[in-house]
Image (spheres, rainbow, N blue to C red):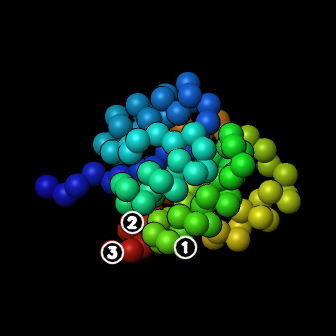
Amino acid sequence: MSQPVKILLVEDEYIIAILLQKNLELLGYHVCELAATGHKAIEVARKERPDFCLMDIRLSGDLDGIDAGLIIKDELKTPIIYMTGYSDNKMKERAQEVNPIAYLIKPVTPDDVKPIIDNYLAKRR
């Protein structure tokens, strides 16, 4: 049997993070240790080597999800799926520098994430 897809979930709103984690796990994904800051996301990504990173753009601390995503993508080649409650064009343009596989507007559900991951994996086979 193959290993479940490992997802790094980066979300600074704890309740949202826990709900999303539980629902992703119900779909069969393995969710790594949760990260609420950009620095923690990089630390967990280096340690866990996730298959995907589901990353909020606006995070607590001095490193936002775009900057953290750039580092994770450059170092580990981890595909990034951005999620945000903000849809302004400047932020979206900046996020495109990371070349994410998706850019989702909150609220995000596992049903939004699953087809993105499935399609990405199908193209890689």
Residue 25 percent location from the top left of the image = 35, 37
Give the camera-side residue of 89 and 45.
Answer: 45
Q: Look at the picture and state if 97 lies above or below 117.
A: below
Report helix, strand or loop for mark 1.
helix
Q: Which residue is mark 2?
A: 121
Which residue is rendered at x = 14% and y = 55% of the image? 1
Residue at 41% x, 31% y: name it. 22
Is residue 16 visible in this depiction of the protein?
A: yes
Q: Which quadrant of the rendered structure holds the C terminus?
A: bottom left
Please tell me whether mark 3 sits on a helix, a strand or a loop.
Answer: loop
Report x, y in % for residue 31: 38, 43
Instruction: Kindly identify the amino acid type of the residue bearing the numbered disc 1.
Output: Asp
On the rendered structure, is 9 left or right of 13? left
Q: Which residue is mark 1?
A: 74
The span from disc 3 to disc 1 (Cα, nearest Å) is 22 Å
Q: Are marks 3 and 2 in contact (CB under 8 Å)?
A: yes
- The residue wearing badge 3 is 125
Q: Which mark is residue 49?
A: none
Q: Callout 3: 10 Å neighbours few (<14), some, many (20+)?
A: few
Instruction: Say which of marks 3 and 1 sits in front.
Output: 1
Q: Amino acid at mark 2?
A: Leu
Q: Spot the residue most to the top.
A: 15
Q: Quadrant of residue 80?
A: bottom right
Sequence order check: which comes first, mark 3 or mark 1? Answer: 1
**Is 65 rendered above or below residue 107?**
below
x 36%, y 54%: residue: 48
Q: Which quadrant of the structure image shows residue 106?
A: top right
Residue at x-position 38% and y-position 74%: 124
